[in-house]
């Protein structure tokens, strides 16, 4: 029954509305969501809407997530967008080995994931994994992420590895602490508060 979690989540959003509205101008000035708003969204588990129940998430159906994000965006577009990005990132867990998904989504109830897939960086094959470098633009909410996601071409001995005649790609997951947020380039006229700056990885294993 989708109505029960929807009603509960909409109640949470309505309770957060005064806080979100109170920080809209600050977010516009700083070009990123204000920390009290991010903390409140996290506390309300709005970033865990797509995380499986087995990992402590809410596991709501798509129509519930869409309705909740719509309600947040009615209050403030930037907050709605960052909530959407952080929440749908839970889908990435379905493509990870169980132990990794449990480490990322189960061990930390406050996890927020974001990033960018294109343009791809490079993942150089090395002993035990890859050395990753690149710069990815438009990573909404990157300041508040605990994990950063980036798309990469695989390089083997300096050459792009091909699979079926096409470049092999990998999606890499890196703790936010290992990424650098680029200079403040998010000078835009809309969704100003999303903090959608570049993030940089330099030879990260």
Image (spheres, helix red, strand yellow):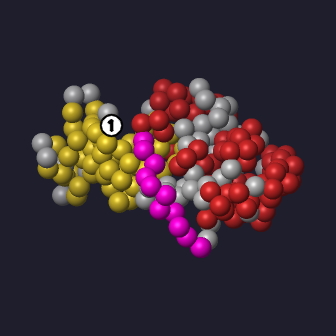
In the image, the segment drawn in magenta is: 179-189
Whole-percent x and y of residue 79?
Answer: 69, 57
Name the residue located 18 percent from the left edge and 51 percent from the top edge.
160
Name the residue located 78 percent from the left edge and 62 percent from the top edge.
75
**Looking at this view, is 172 or 139 the one in front?**
139
Q: Residues within 10 Å of mark 1 (few under 14, many from 20)?
A: some
Residue 121 lies left or right of residue 137; in this view the side is left
Q: Is residue 42 above or below residue 118?
A: above
Residue found farthest to the bottom: 189
**Looking at this view, is 181 or 98 the one in front?**
181
For residue 183: magenta?
Answer: yes
Whole-percent x and y of residue 18?
Answer: 85, 54
| SS class, disc 1 | strand
- Type of secondary structure dominating the magenta stretch: loop
Residue 33 lies left or right of residue 132; in this view the side is right
For residue 169: magenta?
Answer: no
Point out the image quarter for the C terminus: top left
**Looking at this view, is 123 or 38 the one in front?**
38
Tally the numbered discs.
Answer: 1
Residue 9 lies left or right of residue 136; in this view the side is right
Whole-percent x and y of residue 23?
Answer: 76, 55
Quarter of the image where one finds residue 131: top left
Name the residue located 42 percent from the left edge and 36 percent from the top edge.
178
Whole-percent x and y of residue 138?
Answer: 48, 60
Could one spot residue 41 in this view of the protein? no
Circle 1 is placed at which residue position?
A: 204
Residue 38 lies left or right of residue 155; in this view the side is right
Name the residue located 61 percent from the left edge and 65 percent from the top edge.
192
Quarter of the image where one finds residue 146: top right
């Amino acid at each position: 029954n989708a109505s029960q979690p929807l009603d509960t989540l909409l109640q949470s959003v309505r309770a957060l509305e005064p806080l979100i509205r109170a920080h809209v101008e600050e977010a516009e000035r700083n070009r990123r969501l204000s920390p009290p708003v991010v903390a409140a969204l996290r506390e309300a588990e709005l970033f865990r809407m797509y995380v499986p129940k087995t990992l402590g998430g809410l596991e709501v159906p798509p129509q519930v997530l869409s309705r909740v994000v719509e309600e947040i965006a009615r209050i403030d577009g930037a907050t709605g967008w960052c909530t959407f990005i952080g929440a749908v990132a839970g889908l990435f867990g379905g493509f990870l080995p169980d132990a990794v998904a449990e480490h990322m989504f189960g061990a930390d109830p406050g996890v927020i994931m974001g990033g960018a897939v294109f343009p791809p960086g490079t993942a150089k094959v090395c002993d035990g994994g890859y050395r990753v470098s690149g710069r990815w633009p438009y990573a909404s909410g990157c300041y508040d992420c605990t994990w950063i996601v980036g798309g990469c071409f695989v390089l083997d001995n300096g050459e792009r590895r091909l699979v079926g005649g096409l470049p092999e790609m990998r999606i890499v997951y890196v703790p936010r602490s290992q990424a650098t947020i680029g200079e403040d380039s998010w000078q835009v006229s809309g969704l100003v508060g999303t903090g959608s700056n570049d993030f940089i990885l330099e030879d990260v294993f």
